[in-house]
Image (cartoon, rainbow, N blue to C red):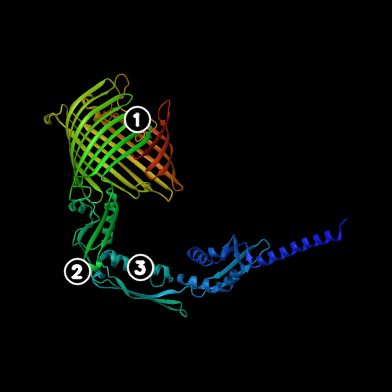
Amino acid sequence: MLTNQRFIDLLGIVLWCFVSLWWIGLSCAGEVKSIKIIVDGLTGQEREALQKVLEVPEDLIKDGVVDEEWLKRLERQGPQKISQALEPFGYYKPEVAVKLEPSDEGLYRFVVTIKAGEPVRVKSINLIVNGTGAFEGAITKMVAEFPLRQGDRLRQDIYEEAKGDLQKKAVSIGYLDAAYSKHSIRVTLSQLSAEIDLVLETGPQYYFGDVTFAGQPGFPDPFLARYLAFKPRDKYSQEKIAQTQVNFVSADRFKMVTINGKKDEAKDNIVPIEITLVPLKQKRVKFGIGYGTDTGVRGSIRYQDFNIMGSGQLFDAEMKISQIFQGLGARYVFPSHIDVKSLASIKLGWEHEKTTDKTVEFLALEGALTRTFGEERIGSVYLRLQQEDSKAGNEETKAFLLMPGVQFSQNRYDSITRPTKGFRYDLELRGTDQFMGSNTGFLQFLGRGEYLISLTKRFSVLTRMQVGATTTSEAASDLPISVRFFAGGDNSVRGYKYQSLGPTDVFGDVVGGRNLLFGSIEIHRAIGKDWAVAAFYDTGNAFDVWSKIDLAQGAGVGGFYYTAVGPIRLYVARQMGVRNPDYRIHLIVGIGL
């Protein structure tokens, strides 16, 4: 039974709850939990631009709640804002209806209905270039291809982009004072027409002046000049400035590169250039570790001195060790003053490789002269002195070779870490004879290449090919084992063990052949940013006689994971065209190798 005091206490609690709920309701009356914006009547870029105009600013959303008063203001001001947003696309007289629809669940629908109407079209366009740059091929081409023409819908975004690109092009090829003396669009709404006037004054063309190096780079000026993509008195070009920047950064000798064209100090339109360089450590030790199905676990230690006695000459020594291969080599490089990739080098190395059927061991000394030939093409001539002691099956070769050779290569991809298109090839011709002091004679050609084609945004096709051919007057067993051809493995016919394909001796051991033929096709499908899957088909073999080629085949699937230092590749391959086909996993992982 309730007493009067308990009744009064209970009534007070009820009244307090009622007042609290009433106060909370008032405080939330001006807020909405969520909003959905619906646009009807537009598509494409126009719709995207409109959605940005109607986007709710982040500072008006607190704890997931949007201010309702702001939404009402947007409803009142919406037609004007939407009309202004459509003007850059040529629609100056749209019919706009805006409605804010509340719902019981706290969700507000902001419905925009638009009839764009007839657009304003270009009635005339007067595009003129004045000055010494008026007859530059790059500029006349852009004028001829200006994206807005008579009768086109007026697109201010296209106009502004094309106008900016034309000026940037003029500046990039040395007309550093290029500017518009007139740029206007006159719109006549009664006729839905627009007249464009655009006049570019190029001014004089500038040229590269003398180059000074700052920042205590530690290298002699003639060495640093190799990295310049221009010469003094060349036409000033921002593209050449950018290429020079790339050359210095790619040299792996500098951690910071700043190039400053001092236009304010130009005399007679000649611009002095200052390049500030902050060098990396001159002496470095690098470690690498990886795994490949061909080699097993592998590792490397590399020592480099990038500036011997302040001359810019390079000393490079490396030791490589794996389950089947051990190698130790040193290389001394004399940079040429011609360009970045031209050089002379001396190399001394020892290698030992042991597989199931063969053991190859040799000591070699090689001198080479390397030059560039046009864009990304490199040629070399070399002379190699080699002492070899090798064995394959029951065949053994103890060879002394004085072997000259020539090489030619080109490499062009759209990305170093994850290319989608590009190609590379390497061609080599080498040989020796008894009259040169060697104990055997042969002439040999080697060709390797690959071509990567982008089919769609996600699909690409990789084709690879290798060709080797040897001519000799002696028996195949007299050809040094180190220059014989073998096939099979991670980078050859997959599905077969490393170098397990080729001519055999009477005991069935693979001894290698005079010639090689290999081809591969691989389809890649990108998945997300860092993954891809693949399907492939390989065929090839090593052999002695071209009329008796027995091509092995392999096919399978694979997957890649792309890292900053290169992809991790995993393939599952199956032999084809044999009675008892085997499966083989090919895994290639490398860090710093």
Give the x, y percent position of residue 268.
18, 69
Q: Residues within 10 Å of mark 2 (few under 14, many from 20)?
A: few
- Residue 27 versus residue 477: which sits nearer the camera? 27
SS for callout 2: loop
Under tag 1, what secondary structure?
A: loop
The label nearer to you, 2 versus 3, is 2
> The residue tagged with tag 3: helix, strand or loop?
helix
Label 2 amino acid?
Lys
Q: Where is mark 3, residue-wise?
A: 164
Left or right? Give the position of 244 relative to 584.
Answer: left
**Residue placed under numbered mark 1 in the picture:** 498
Relative to residue 98, is residue 442 depicted above or below? above
Q: Going by the picture, which residue comes out furthest to the right? A: 1
Rate crowding at label 3 as few (under 14), some (14 to 19) or many (20 or more) other CA atoms within 10 Å: few
Figure check: 202 above or below 259: below
For the question of whether residue 591 can be seen, the reply is: yes
